[in-house]
C-alpha cells in the first residue's frame, strides 16, 4: 500500500485542532481548504499579504492529510477525533497517492528561477540552465526565501547591482540564507545572517554549505558588535519600523541599507522611521511590493552618535 490522503470535512472551529492532531499522529503534511471552493458559498479569508489572516480556516473546511504507507486512515481519523474531543469519528474519504506521483508533482512546482542579470536559483533536482551564472542551489523548505516572492527577488536584484568585493554584509531576518549566500557569491565578506527562528538558522547553515559559501549565522543575541558596509532586511513593515534605530546603528556612515517585505502603500511610513539616520527611498517596485534603499549620513552631520562602532570584520 502506497501513500494515501485522508480527507475530512468539518466546521471551522474543529479544523485547526484536527490538523494539529493529525500532525502529532504522524501525518506527513496537512492542508486546510475551503470545502465550498468554486461554489456560490466560497468564502475568502482576508489578510494583508505576508501576514496571517484573522481566520485560519473556512466556515466549511476540508482537511487533507498525507499518510505514509502502513498508516491506517481509519485508525488515524479515530485517534485525531478523540484527541480534539469529537463525540465520534467524522466521515472521511481516502485517496490513493502513489509515491512517484506526489514527489514528481511537488518537484514540478519548483523550476529554476532567473533573477536579475545573471542569477539562477536552482532546486537540487535540476541542472543550472547557465553554468556560468551566479547559481544558488536552494530547495523549498520551511525557512522563507527561495527567490519566488517579489520581496526576495527585489533584494537579490539590488545585491547583484550593489555589492562590491570585500564589503561586509549583515542579513537581518535571513530565513533560508538566500540573500546572505548571494551577497557572499557577489564578493561580500565577512557576511553575517541573523534570524529569530532557530530552524531558519539551521536551514541557512545547510544551504550555505551546499553552496560553498562563507556566512556566519546566529540568533539575535549572537549578532556581532560593530557596523557593516551593507545591511539588508527582508522582513515585514511593522518589525522594520520597530527595528529602525537598531538596524541603522549597524550601518557604517556612508554604508547602505536595503529593506523589503514592504507593500508600496507602506513605503513612506517605513522610510520615515529610517530618515533620522539614512536618506532612503523606493529603489524598485514589483507586484505591489517595494525595496527601499538608502545611504547612511555621517554621524557628525546629524549630531547622532552611532550605537555600534568599529568594523564588523574585527569581530
Image (cartoon, grey):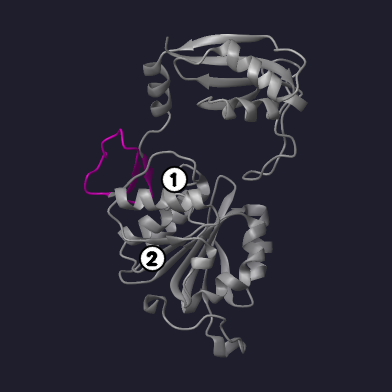
Name above or below for residue 222 compared with residue 185: below
At x 26%, y 39%, the residue is 129
Judge the density around disc 1: few (<14), some (14-19), many (≥20) Cα neighbours within 10 Å: many
Q: Are marks 1 and 2 in contact (CB under 8 Å)?
A: no
Residues 293 and 200: in front is 200
Q: Quadrant of the N terminus?
A: top left
Q: Under tag 2, what secondary structure?
A: strand
Name which residue lies at 39% across and 39% down: 139
Residue marked by disc 2: 191
Of labels 1 and 2, earlier in sequence is 1
Q: Which residues are magenta?
A: 113-133
Q: Secondary structure at mark 1?
A: loop
Picture mark count: 2
* Magenta portion: prevailing SS class: loop
Q: Farthest residue toward the left?
A: 132
Q: Nearer the viewer, residue 216 or 153?
A: 216
Is residue 305 one of those drawn in magenta? no
Q: Above or below — where is 158 with respect to 76?
A: below
Where is residue 112, by image quadrant? top left
From the viewer's perspective, tell me whether residue 131 is left or right of residue 286.
Answer: left
Find residue 147 and report its horizontal and vertical position in percent.
44, 45
- Return the x and y of residue 55 as percentages of the image width and height: 74, 35
Residue at the spot of label 1: 147
In-image side of 149 versus 237 (left or right): left
Amino acid at each position: 500500500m502506497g501513500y494515501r490522503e485522508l480527507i475530512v470535512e468539518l466546521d471551522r472551529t474543529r479544523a485547526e485542532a484536527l490538523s494539529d492532531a493529525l500532525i502529532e499522529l504522524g501525518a506527513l503534511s496537512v492542508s486546510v481548504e475551503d470545502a465550498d471552493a468554486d461554489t456560490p458559498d466560497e468564502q475568502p479569508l482576508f489578510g494583508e499579504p505576508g501576514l496571517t489572516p484573522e481566520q485560519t480556516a473556512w466556515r466549511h473546511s476540508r482537511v487533507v492529510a498525507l499518510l505514509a504507507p502502513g498508516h491506517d486512515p481509519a485508525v488515524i481519523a479515530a485517534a485525531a477525533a478523540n484527541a480534539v474531543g469529537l463525540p465520534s469519528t467524522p466521515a472521511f474519504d481516502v485517496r490513493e497517492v502513489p509515491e512517484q506521483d506526489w514527489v514528481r508533482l511537488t518537484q514540478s512546482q519548483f523550476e529554476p528561477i532567473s533573477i536579475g542579470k545573471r542569477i539562477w536559483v536552482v532546486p537540487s533536482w535540476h541542472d543550472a540552465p547557465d553554468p556560468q551564472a551566479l547559481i544558488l542551489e536552494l530547495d523549498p523548505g520551511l525557512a522563507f526565501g527561495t527567490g519566488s516572492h517579489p520581496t526576495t527577488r527585489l533584494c537579490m536584484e539590488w545585491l547583484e547591482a550593489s555589492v562590491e568585493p570585500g564589503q561586509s554584509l549583515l542579513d537581518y531576518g535571513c530565513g533560508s540564507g538566500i540573500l546572505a549566500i548571494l551577497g557572499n557569491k557577489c564578493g561580500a565578506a565577512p557576511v553575517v545572517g541573523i534570524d529569530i527562528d532557530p530552524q531558519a538558522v539551521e536551514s541557512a547553515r545547510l544551504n550555505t554549505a551546499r553552496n560553498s559559501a562563507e556566512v556566519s549565522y546566529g540568533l539575535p543575541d549572537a549578532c556581532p558588535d560593530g557596523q557593516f558596509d551593507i545591511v539588508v532586511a527582508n522582513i515585514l513593515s511593522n518589525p522594520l519600523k520597530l527595528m529602525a534605530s537598531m538596524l541603522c546603528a549597524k550601518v557604517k556612515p556612508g554604508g547602505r541599507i536595503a529593506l523589503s517585505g514592504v507593500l508600496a502603500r507602506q513605503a513612506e511610513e517605513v522610510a520615515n522611521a529610517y530618515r533620522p539616520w539614512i536618506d532612503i527611498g523606493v529603489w524598485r517596485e514589483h507586484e505591489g511590493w517595494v525595496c527601499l534603499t538608502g545611504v547612511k549620513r555621517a554621524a557628525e552631520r546629524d549630531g547622532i552618535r552611532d550605537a555600534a562602532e568599529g568594523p564588523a570584520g574585527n569581530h
